[in-house]
């Protein structure tokens, strides 16, 4: 029997060493929030090496989803190569690729994901400056759906409306079978609206990154009760937050042991198994 409880971190960002500090500072300035670290691959790998002791129980991160959005079209190829190479060099990483809305060759890019060991698509509409439900994005979503690529959407912002939960609700009304992961519990700083607007679906999942420091355990439980306990994934949003501290916050919500295990490990393990065998 293992001497620790396994954890999957379903939302992490990494950057090449030479631009890691610049990238961290850009994210820090955009959100006006302090950053935990610089977001290099080695820093993220170090998070897996530690045993996290919380309430007399040992936890250990065993897998991490990595992604990075292309802010301009010309970054797409290099970012996907970087994520792909990182995944191939370390099997504990799970890679999501990127595209930019202005990439005309999106079909070829998405079709190449699985050969690159990229199992999904990450979009950050606030950085990439497009509305989630823009009509010109529907061909991209349809291609992703046809290729069985889940789409991880950055959700919510205090300043901008590109990723407001109403945008995702409109998209999913038109494409109800698109596998979507709504980051930040459906809308950073817009959780009340997300709870009201979004509709339960077997194809709609949530990660709870950049969320736990700002919400109550009762609010998260309301989401779980509405959308289903199997639809939620633990995530840290590294390098913004410390994965260990985010995990400690969730554990201190004092949910039943079986539910906590689903949130921190089993749900995403099942999700990855489904994607692998689809």
Image (cartoon, rainbow, N blue to C red):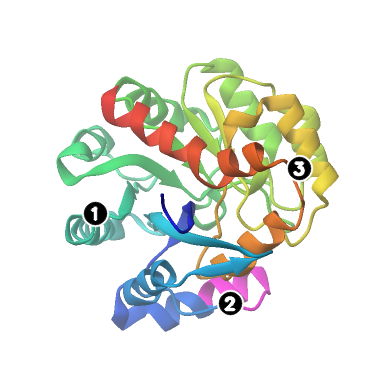
Q: Nearer the viewer, mark 3 or mark 2?
A: 3
**Quarter of the image holding residue 228?**
top right
- Within 10 Å of disc 1 (Cα), the crowding (few <14, some 14-19, many 20+) is few
Distance from disc 2 to disc 1, alpha carbons, whole Å, reads 26 Å
Q: Please give the label number shown on residue 91.
A: 1
Q: Is residue 243 magenta?
A: no
Identify which residue is drawn at 57% across, 49% down.
234
- Whether residue 159 sits left or right of residue 133 in the image: it is right
Q: Please give the label number shown on residue 220.
A: 3
**Quarter of the image holding residue 64?**
bottom left
Q: Find numbered disc 1 in the image and state the secondary structure of the residue it sits on.
A: loop
Give x and y (percent) for residue 86: 23, 61
Q: Please give the label number shown on residue 144.
A: none
Quadrant occupied by the C terminus: top left
Between 225 and 25, the one lying in front of the other is 225
Q: Nearer the viewer, mark 2 or mark 1?
A: 1
- Within 10 Å of disc 2 (Cα), the crowding (few <14, some 14-19, many 20+) is some
Identify which residue is drawn at 66% across, 21% down.
200
């Amino acid at each position: 029997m293992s001497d620790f409880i396994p954890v999957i971190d379903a939302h992490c960002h990494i950057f090449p060493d030479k631009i890691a500090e610049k990238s961290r500072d850009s994210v820090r300035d955009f959100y006006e929030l302090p950053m935990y670290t610089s977001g290099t691959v080695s820093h993220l790998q170090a998070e897996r090496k530690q045993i996290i002791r919380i309430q007399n129980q040992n936890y250990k991160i065993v897998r991490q989803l990595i992604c990075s959005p292309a802010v301009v079209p010309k970054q797409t190829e290099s970012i996907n190569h970087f994520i792909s190479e990182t995944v191939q060099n370390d099997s504990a990483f799970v890679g999501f690729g990127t595209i930019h809305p202005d990439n005309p060759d999106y079909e070829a890019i998405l079709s190449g994901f699985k050969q690159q060991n990229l199992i999904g698509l990450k979009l950050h509409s606030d950085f990439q400056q497009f509305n989630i439900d823009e009509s010109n994005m529907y061909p991209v979503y349809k291609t992703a759906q046809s290729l069985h690529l889940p789409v991880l959407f950055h959700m919510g912002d205090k300043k901008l409306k590109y990723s407001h939960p109403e945008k995702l609700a409109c998209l999913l009304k038109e494409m109800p079978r698109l596998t979507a992961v709504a980051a930040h519990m459906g809308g950073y700083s817009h959780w009340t609206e997300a709870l009201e607007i979004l509709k339960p679906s077997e194809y709609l999942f949530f990660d709870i990154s950049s969320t736990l420091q700002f919400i109550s355990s009762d609010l998260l439980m309301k989401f779980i009760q509405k959308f289903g306990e199997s639809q939620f994934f633990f995530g840290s949003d590294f390098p913004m937050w410390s994965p260990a501290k985010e995990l400690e916050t969730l554990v201190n919500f004092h949910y039943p042991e079986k539910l906590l295990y689903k949130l921190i490990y089993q749900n995403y393990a099942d999700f990855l198994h489904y994607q692998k065998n689809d």
